Amino acid sequence: QVQLVQSGAEVRKPGASVKVSCKASGYSFTSYYIHWVRQAPGQGLEWMGIINPSGGSASYAQRFQGRVTLTTDASTSTVYMELSSLRSEDTAVYYCAKEMIAPSHLDYWGQGTLVTVSS
Amino acid sequence: DIQMTQSPSSLSASVGDRVTITCRASQRIDTYLSWYQQKPGKAPKLLIYAASNLQTGVPSRFSASGSGTDFTLTISNLQPEDFASYHCQQTYSTPWTFGQGTKVEIK
């Protein structure tokens, strides 16, 4: 069965970086894009970016440009999301999600990773 | 960016009620619209894709419709496990924006 398993909770100080992993299984890893979405406490869902695991090309939401980097390791079927220059407003649960195409939608989600930014 | 506006932001309902949530896009998105259910502390779960297609395994009391800019999600015969938050998302163009969510609470 399809699974996306994310790394555990992280605590960082303002200005630091964090790297969250998302390990996929149960499907052909390089055939489906992976998206990242975050949710601040008590807030709605916010789309951050997308990566093509075949080749590694990525696209980011404008507000995260320059701070977020998505990478992929096909040998381990893992996608990584690195967010730099962290500030308190980046405290959120970060989710990876698999895209099903034609028509596009996010059919499987990771369990989420809480990133807390606090001095 | 395409803005998605959901209403209401919250509602109270009883078991057995029929509930309707609306989602409006700031520009036409054809039927590139998904609906998700989210329970506290859990990841979103896909309910509906392409505006009206029920995801496999989702109960038939969930239905949705719409095209262009206006969309609705309807839950018929509300069950205890349906008390949750619901989010719409456009997948017409990146960034794939979400509505602000609707919390369905027990009356």
Image (spheres, rainbow, N blue to C red):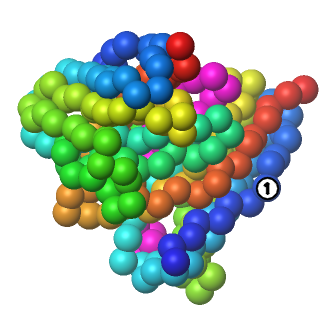
Q: Is residue A39 visible?
A: yes
- Dividing the picture into quadrants, the one containing residue B90 is top left
Would you name the residue on which mark 1 appears? A8
Q: Is residue B60 left or right of residue B65?
A: right
Q: Position of residue A82 (x, y in %)?
A: 65, 52
Toward the front, the furthest residue is B16
**Is disc 1 placed on a helix, strand or loop?**
loop
Q: Residues within 10 Å of mark 1 (few under 14, many from 20)?
A: few
The magenta segment is A39-57
Residue at 59% across, 57% down: A110
Toward the bottom, the furthest residue is A75
The quarter of the rendered structure image containing the N terminus of chain B is: top left
Of B62 and A8, which appears nearest the observer? B62
Residue at 34% across, 15% down: B7
Q: Position of residue A49 (x, y in %)?
A: 45, 48
Residue at 36% across, 33% down: B77
In reply to whether residue A16 is colored magenta, the answer given is: no
Q: Is residue A82 visible?
A: no
Of B95 and A95, which appears nearest the observer? A95
Q: Position of residue B83 (x, y in %)?
A: 53, 30
Q: Is residue B5 left or right of residue B30?
A: right
Q: Which residue type carries mark 1?
A: Gly
Toward the right, the furthest residue is A119
Residue at 72% across, 31% down: A91
